[in-house]
DNA sequence: GAAGATTGATCGATCAATCTTT
DNA sequence: AAAGATTGATCGATCAATCTTC
């Protein structure tokens, strides 16, 4: 029945604040520049990178790690805003990015990249980078078990 | 107008997955053991640690870094469940933990601590710890600017 | 009926507007 | 009016139930 000691509590608080602050900074910058939410951006980049503009909804869900219903609603909202369209293919749906969606993601990407550099990469000293990123990789592996 | 190169993209994806996985693991374990959400747990531990059981709503909001309205609604839900009570003090409110709230947080704390160890601390090699946590501290400082 | 997707119900978060006490 | 808090409206997330196409 152990609890966290002071150092551990401080480290946990630090971790929580760091992870929130990085995400908030990126969402803020991308949103301010383009009006896209984190979810919007995630969907659009997958369409462009994995599917060259279109993907089956199923594949999109898998690559995002989202529930079907969440993606369905997200797509509805994005379709309303003209960022993508839904095309039927039998029982399946193919989601295709529109011109407006491509424009938005093209505008967002450099902002996204710059925000990640500023909020995250720039704080990791070059000398510590290897070690740091390998630790993060270990965390993913263990935490997701 | 730079974008992320492959290594950077991989690192960013890794970071996002690691931070999500750690939080999800902790929320899952605490929720499964006690029925408390991350927000419930955050509120209750502040009451106990900062206020020895009760705090002005204002102070609670500040220490959580939450908007007034969010806290107000969270407190309403928690009061309904008997985890705390609201007491008027002029225009202010004093939030006091109940017996049920104390029991819940007492049950949750060791689970929370164990989850943090497993999902986060155990993945940071002792030899890299100093360096790692000081990098996280730098990230907080820079990202939150 | 199995695979793929959407919908209803409900909960949680946020903004702006409002109410209350001093 | 200022400080403290709540409420209405709306958006987003999740679960279970439902609809559609094969």
Image (cartoon, coloured by chain):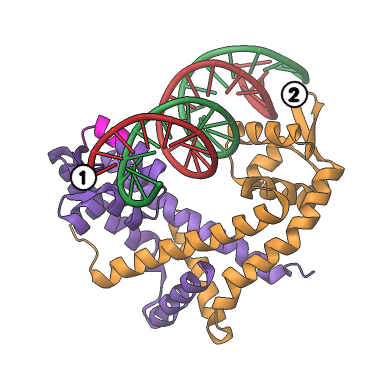
Chain colours: A purple, B orange, C green, D red
Residue reaching furthest to the left? A99
Q: Position of residue A143 (x, y in %)?
A: 53, 68
Q: Is residue B140 visible?
A: no
- The one nearer the camera, A35 or B103, is B103
Magenta part of the protein: which range? Answer: A76-84
Q: Position of residue A53 (x, y in %)?
A: 16, 50
Residue, x 26% and y 30% (percent of image)? Answer: A80
Residue, x 80% and y 45% (percent of image)? Answer: B101
Label 1 SS: strand
Residue, x 44% and y 77% (percent of image)? Answer: A132
Q: Nearer the viewer, mark 2 or mark 1?
A: 1
Question: Label 2 lies in what chain?
Answer: B
In the figure, residue B73 lies in which quadrant?
Answer: top right
In the figure, residue A69 lies in which quadrant?
Answer: top left
Q: Is residue B11 visible?
A: yes
Q: Report how far apart the C-alphas of labels 2 and 1 lie in the structure.
A: 55 Å
With respect to residue A61, does A122 lie above or below? below
Q: Position of residue B65 (x, y in %)?
A: 59, 45
**Residue A77 part of the magenta segment:** yes
User: Left or right: C4 with respect to B98?
Assistant: left
Local crowd size for mark 1, using a 10 Å CA cut-off: few (<14), some (14–19), many (≥20): some
For label 1, the residue is: A94
User: Left or right: B129 with respect to B107?
Assistant: left
**Residue B103 part of the magenta segment:** no
Question: Label 1 lies in what chain?
Answer: A
User: Left or right: A132 with respect to B104?
Assistant: left
For label 2, the residue is: B91
Q: Position of residue A130 (x, y in %)?
A: 39, 81
């Amino acid at each position: 029945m152990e609890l966290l000691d002071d150092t551990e509590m401080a480290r946990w608080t630090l971790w929580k604040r760091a992870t929130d602050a990085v995400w908030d900074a990126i969402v803020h910058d991308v949103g301010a520049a383009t009006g896209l939410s984190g979810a919007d951006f995630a969907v659009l980049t997958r369409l462009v990178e994995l599917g060259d503009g279109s993907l089956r909804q199923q594949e999109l869900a898998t690559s995002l790690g989202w529930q079907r219903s969440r993606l369905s609603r997200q797509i509805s909202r994005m379709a309303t805003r003209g960022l993508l369209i839904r095309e039927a293919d039998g029982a399946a749906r193919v989601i295709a990015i529109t011109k407006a969606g491509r424009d938005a993601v093209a505008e967002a990407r450099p902002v996204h990249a710059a925000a990640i550099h500023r909020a995250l990469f720039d704080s990791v000293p070059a000398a510590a980078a290897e070690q740091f990123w390998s630790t993060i990789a270990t965390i993913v592996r263990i935490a997701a078990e």
